[in-house]
Image: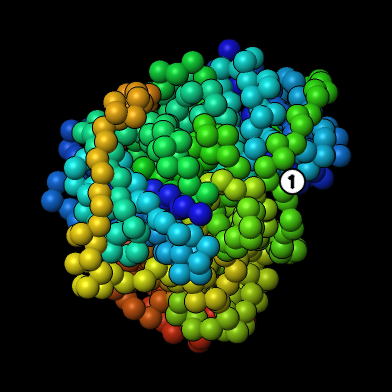
């Protein structure tokens, strides 16, 4: 079966973003950008399914500015077979991305769609579920284990309090959690190979999708600052402070 | 203008996160109804009817709703959605799983993890692991929202006297099936609702040491146990104890971080705690930047000493 994976270009997880002084957003000029870590896990899972002979082709999709090509090249270097860039300079909100992916799901007819559960920039945790609803597919979010058997996929999910296992009829949408796998490193030969892999570009208009934002950001502010407190010399002082100063014991 | 809150429950008891979502729903300005979608969940519907501020409970009961499958619960919500201006879910694993399906089918944006209601169409929510707070305004007719529990006080779970209306349960989608679950049984308070949380990090070095040090300290304090991602990845603690940007968000009265360096992703999950205590050997660890009380010490000495002194 074919696997479609969605990858997002985000501010690298190690960067501590700064809010712009005019409160219009965060400053992402000149900061390191990377593939959303949860999407990297999605790529890895698809590649493992291909290595296991379950998946025969992996199509990676990224939606956004032209530079998302770099993110797609990373996916190709990790083992995806071809890339699709949906290029736009418009701000893309989750519903719009889900609609773009739905159009590509109709075009590509994958058996599995795998993507991260959440992007670490907008922290929305929506696209996989929205795509599943729009394409009328079953979903398994927050996956920590994926087993394909015939036209069914069994997915173990991280839920509040523990784990839950679902069985979905394919085609299905899976979103990844942290413990699904540990993504491999990109190697230089694979980066070279990735340069030769096919990459197609569409615009939202090509796919017939209106991506106009639905939410208007009125302002982006710094969170309340939490000042550092005091260092205490020993356990006895700590307990004394907790009992008599903070009064939490 | 009426808001619908989707109750969090396990068919037997009403989840505490529902109460915070009711407070957020009340702040949206209209009446508040609660939907209990479950199987043999009459007790939950009764409990929901007692919540202060709730005027009506919709109770859908059927086998298709026994395991909160996203496909079925979303369809259940959509069956009544036309009556509501706001549809709110607690930002639990269930709420996050189902809400976007509802929003997409209504062709509206979802507003995730709100921490403040500034108006009927304007909400505050954290982005970038809580390093920025965005205020967003929705132009959509229906607002589909997930509510971060730590952002809102819990509504009183008594004092209400809502009517309970039974509605038909939707049919099973046939596309997904519940196979099983492994839910840890514990007498400890729920991590996201506990007054005290003791969290362990990578410095504990092993699952045995995590058990040996963190468990008795949590026992003494009547605390819930949490963990950093590093500790969970290393197998010292189970997945569902992870506190952080993409794990549990907690804001207890007292948070004790033991052997946790304080990556921004971890801080995102606990920096709204009232009092933070950090115990770490590395005095440069970022966790000390948010701690009210920092103790630079060896965990393996400090924690037993703390347990003895409590």
Q: Is residue B79 left or right of B66 when viewed as pictured? A: left
Residue A34 can be seen, yes or no: no
Q: Look at mark 1 in the image and give the residue it sits on.
A: B67
Q: Nearer the viewer, residue B277 or A102?
A: A102
- Could you tell me which residue is drawn at 30 percent across and 50 percent down? A83
Quadrant of residue A150 within the rendered picture: bottom right
Rendered position, B138 above or below A47 = above
- Asked which colour scheme the image uses, the reply is rainbow
Rendered position, A173 above or below B156 = below
Estimate the x, y position of residue B39 in percent, counting from the top left. 82, 39
Q: Nearer the viewer, residue B54 or B235?
A: B235
Q: Quadrant of the C terminus of chain A?
A: bottom right
- Could you tell me which residue is drawn at 53 percent across and 39 percent down? A132
- Could you tell me which residue is drawn at 75 percent across and 29 percent down? B170
Rendered position, A18 above or below A52 = above
Q: Is residue A155 left or right of B245 when viewed as pictured? A: right
């Amino acid at each position: 079966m074919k696997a479609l994976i969605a990858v997002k270009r985000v501010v690298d997880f190690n960067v501590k973003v700064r809010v712009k002084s005019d409160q219009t957003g965060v400053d992402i000029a000149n900061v390191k950008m990377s593939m959303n870590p949860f999407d990297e896990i999605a790529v890895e899972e698809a590649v493992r399914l291909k290595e296991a002979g379950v998946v025969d082709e992996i199509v990676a999709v990224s939606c956004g500015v032209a530079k998302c090509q770099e993110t797609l090249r990373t996916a190709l270097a990790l083992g995806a077979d071809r890339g699709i860039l949906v290029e736009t300079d418009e701000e893309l909100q989750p519903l719009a991305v889900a609609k773009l992916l739905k159009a590509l799901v109709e075009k590509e007819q994958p058996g599995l769609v795998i993507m991260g559960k959440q992007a670490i920039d907008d922290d929305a945790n929506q696209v996989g579920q929205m795509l599943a609803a729009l394409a009328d597919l079953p979903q398994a979010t927050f996956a920590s284990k994926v087993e394909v058997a015939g036209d069914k996929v069994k997915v173990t999910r991280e839920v509040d309090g523990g784990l839950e296992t679902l069985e979905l009829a394919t085609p299905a949408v899976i979103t990844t959690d942290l413990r699904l796998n540990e993504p491999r490193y990109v190697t230089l030969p694979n980066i070279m190979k990735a340069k030769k892999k096919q990459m197609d570009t569409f615009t939202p208009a090509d796919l017939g999708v209106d991506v106009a934002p639905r939410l208007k950001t009125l302002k982006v502010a710094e969170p309340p600052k939490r000042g550092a407190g005091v260092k205490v010399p020993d356990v006895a002082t700590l307990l004394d402070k907790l009992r008599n100063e903070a009064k939490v014991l | 203008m009426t808001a619908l809150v989707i109750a969090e429950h396990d068919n037997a008891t009403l989840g505490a996160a529902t109460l915070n979502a009711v407070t957020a729903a009340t702040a949206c300005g209209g009446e508040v109804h609660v939907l209990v979608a479950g199987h043999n969940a009459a007790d939950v519907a009764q409990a929901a009817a007692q919540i202060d501020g709730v005027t009506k409970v919709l109770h859908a009961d059927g086998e298709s709703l026994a395991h909160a499958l996203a496909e079925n619960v979303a369809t259940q919500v959509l069956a009544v959605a036309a009556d509501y201006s706001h549809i709110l879910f607690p930002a639990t694993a269930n709420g996050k799983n189902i809400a976007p399906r509802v929003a997409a089918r209504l062709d509206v944006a979802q507003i995730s993890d709100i921490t403040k209601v500034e108006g009927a169409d304007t909400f505050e929510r954290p982005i970038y692991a809580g390093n920025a707070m965005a205020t967003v305004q929705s132009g959509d007719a229906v607002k589909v929202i997930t509510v971060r529990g730590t952002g809102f006080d819990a509504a009183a779970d008594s004092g209400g006297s809502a009517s309970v209306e039974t509605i038909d349960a939707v049919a099973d989608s046939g596309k997904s099936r519940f196979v099983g679950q492994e839910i840890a049984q514990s007498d400890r308070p729920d991590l996201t609702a506990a007054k005290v949380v003791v969290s362990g990090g990578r410095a504990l070095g092993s699952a045995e040491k995590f058990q040996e040090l963190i468990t008795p300290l949590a026992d003494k304090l009547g605390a819930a146990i949490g963990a950093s991602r590093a500790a969970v990845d290393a197998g010292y603690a189970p997945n569902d104890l992870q506190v952080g940007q993409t794990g549990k968000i907690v804001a207890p009265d007292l948070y004790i971080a033991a052997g946790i360096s304080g990556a921004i992703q971890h801080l995102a999950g606990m920096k709204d705690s009232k009092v933070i205590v950090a115990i770490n050997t590395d005095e440069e660890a970022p966790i000390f930047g948010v701690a009210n009380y920092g103790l630079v010490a060896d965990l393996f000495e400090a924690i037993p000493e703390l347990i003895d002194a409590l």
